Image (cartoon, rainbow, N blue to C red):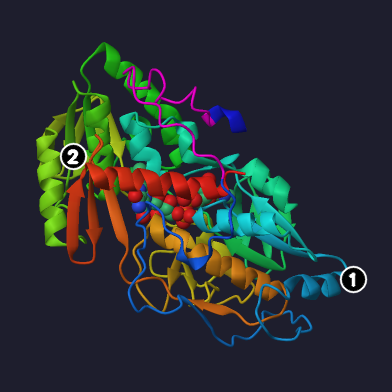
Amino acid sequence: MGQGADGAGQGPHSGRDHCGRTGRRALGRIRAGHAAWPGAEQDSGHGAQLPHPGRGQQIRRRPVAPCPPARRPVALGPALPRLEAGLSTAAAKGPARQLLLLGAGHAHVQVLAQMAQAPWTGAQITLIAPYDRQLYSGMVPGFVAGHYALDDCVIPLQPLVQRSGIRWLQRSVSALDAQAQTVQLDDGSVLHYDWLSINTGPVQNRALIEQSLPGAREHALFIRPIEAFGALWPQVVQMGQSRALRIAVVGAGAAGMELAMAMRHCLPGAAITLLCGDVPLGAGYNAGVQAKLRAALLKRKITLLPDSAAGLRSGEILLASGASLACDVPVLTVGAQAPAWLQPSGLALDAQGFVAVDACQRSTSHAQVFAAGDVSSRVDRTLARSGVYAVRAGPALATNLAATLAGQLLLEHQPPQHTLNLISCGDHFAIASWGEHSAQGRWVWWLKDWIDRRFLARYRL
Ligand SMILES: Cc1cc2nc3c(=O)[nH]c(=O)nc-3n(C[C@H](O)[C@H](O)[C@H](O)COP(=O)(O)OP(=O)(O)OC[C@H]3O[C@@H](n4cnc5c(N)ncnc54)[C@H](O)[C@@H]3O)c2cc1C
């Protein structure tokens, strides 16, 4: 995607959006602001964290053994200012060590942005990411609703990579051998690493899902990879313009609810059903948010079906209750799983197969491996898998990667206890959740829009 592709003249706001409406107000493009490095206190629509009265630093310095193989430690002190000296000294002694960054997820774009401000020297740094942009999932419901063009919702990688002076292989990782310190890419090539950082997010494992939901592979529209979903959604919209579609969203998590309401806004004539399973709607949110979510879904004429999908056939979903639901477009939001290539990697994993990391985002089994975002699991605390925590881990990950290269101390990352979650309702209306508090209104949507755009602007160079 070119930089100009998200210009105001091409987005949905200034002309016809992908839902076929015209004459929407031009919101204009937020220009890439620069970016004093946002640090640990940044927020995003992925559950922006408001400053908590009295809360101290979120990153705490803790003595942690430097990663083997041991690099001659440089004098200890503030990690970042001393890095360049440490790295340059190391570089003069031999061939560059290899740092591989797997995936351009929410944490890694912050690592890239930090390198773009002051390139790291002394190690060859390679990013492995299959797409030339990172699609920001927090704005995807807004894209589905027709508020944004897809290009409004992305962080282009090329400018970040260019500015940071690192190497980029536009590939996917298909295997990892933590013992041999190698990764294999989808073209068969094998790369050695001295340090590795993983931020590849969750997957919807088609093979696994097919086992519990026969027919899914052939008939379902999966929301991950989210790039693929973004590319396919306009086709659904096109179909919906010639006939009234029957859409079923399978899975009533936050993403499922947001998507169902966004689809309602985009396709007012469609019959939209949300398959809720046997979990209470909005489980995990406080009672006020749960009530607001239910009311919002019903007000937008979303049918709430307390049943689960058991199989998919052409034109219908077979339900666990034994009934079937006529459906043209089954959208699968369930099943955010760990990538299958982690299983034989030798890395310590949690029970679900995600990389087990400590408070420094470092693998509990391999000190030269770091992981952040949904692909990782903190062993010291339970965190929801969400964009907000992936975003929050970014500054700490960047600091610790840099410190590791320089043989300096690592920092503990203390994620916030409460996060502000903003759930969009399709139209310019949203629901806010903060601990035990809830609120709703058009102002919440505008707040979310402002936060999301501001977040992206930081990384659009
Ligand atoms: C529609 C939708 C809306 C959502 N809204 C919200 C929200 O409002 N708030 C919230 O907190 N959460 C939200 N989420 C959840 C959120 O998307 C995830 O929690 C978040 O994306 C996790 O971030 P991440 O950085 O770990 O991974 P990702 O954002 O998934 O990024 C992973 C990156 O790695 C790349 N990658 C994947 N596999 C490989 C591979 N094998 N090799 C190399 N690169 C690879 C991907 O292309 C991608 O660029 C939403 C999810 C969806 C689907």
**Res. 326 image quadrant:** top left
Q: Which mark is residue 274?
A: 2
Magenta part of the chain:
6-32
**Viewer-side residue, 427 vs 191:** 427
Determine the CA span between mark 1 and mark 2.
60 Å
Q: Is residue 7 magenta?
A: yes
Does residue 4 show up?
A: yes
**Majority SS type along the magenta span:** loop
For the C terminus, give its image quadrant.
Answer: top right
Measured as percent of width and height from the top left, residue 120 is found at: 74, 63
Secondary structure found at label 2: strand
Lateral position of residue 235 relative to residue 245, left or right: right
Q: Which residue is mark 1?
A: 92
Measured as percent of width and height from the top left, residue 393 is found at: 49, 65
Mark 2 nearby-residue class (10 Å; few <14, some 14–19, many ≥20): many
Lateral position of residue 136 relative to residue 417, left or right: right
From what the image shows, is residue 296 above or below residue 72? above
